[in-house]
Amino acid sequence: MRILVVVASKHQATAEIGDAIVEELRAARHEAKRVTPQDVRGLDGVDAVVLGSAVYMTQWMESMRNLVGRLGDELRRRPVWAFSCGLAGVAASGRVQDPVRASSVIRQLDPIGYTTFAGRLDPAALVLRERSVVRLSGAPEGDYRDWDEIRSWARGIARQLDAHLAQAG
């Protein structure tokens, strides 16, 4: 099955999650490729889609919101999974809060599966304005991504696709 993993990432933490998902899908013998939202012109030849976006100020990145606006009908005709990546709530609870409330985009798509992964914050990678926002918000520095959780979620997608293929065949 041909799976497009579309990831909106500003500082590459979410892109790296997308790469791990692609690796797991390929290990399960699916054809998978990671691209940015700007790279997607259409979904011809794509059997399933995984969408992932970093979350800033409770929203998916603009490039991903634009993609869903442009290709929403095509996306709704395919199996879609979605994930968000962010740091909301990590400092207080050790776990990221579910930002499904953050984006009506996710609700528009009604994905088969949706999850939220904790992200990474490296202040050295930020511009001055971003460092100021981070300081005011109290976002914790560090890499909170749980690679076992990410890879397990991707393997779940592969299992669901395999089951879908078995039913169709």
Image: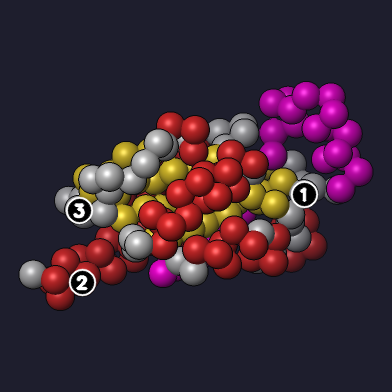
Percent position of residue 106, x then y:
56, 62
The CA span between labels 2 and 1 is 37 Å
Image: 167 above or below 60: below
Q: Earlier in the sequence, mark 2 or mark 1?
A: 1
Name the amino acid type tagged 1: Met
Image: 17 above or below 111: above
The CA span between labels 1 and 3 is 35 Å
Name the amino acid type tagged 3: Met
Q: Residues within 10 Å of mark 3 (few under 14, many from 20)?
A: some
Percent position of residue 15, x then y:
50, 38
Residue 156 placement, left or right of 101: left
Picture quarter with the C terminus: bottom left
Q: Which mark is residue 57?
A: 1
Q: Which mark is residue 163?
A: 2
Name the amino acid type tagged 2: Ala
**Residue 13, visible in the rendered structure:** no
Q: Which mark is residue 1?
A: 3
Camera-side residue of 50 and 89: 50
Percent position of residue 158, x then y:
27, 60
Q: Secondary structure at mark 1?
A: loop
In this picture, which residue range is highlighted in magenta?
112-137
Q: Is residue 134 magenta?
A: yes
The CA span between labels 2 and 3 is 12 Å
Classify residue 31 by image quadrant. Answer: top left
Residue sitting at 69 percent across and 66 percent down? 101
Q: Secondary structure at mark 3?
A: loop
Image: 146 above or below 123: below
Q: Is residue 99 magenta?
A: no
Q: Earlier in the sequence, mark 2 or mark 3?
A: 3
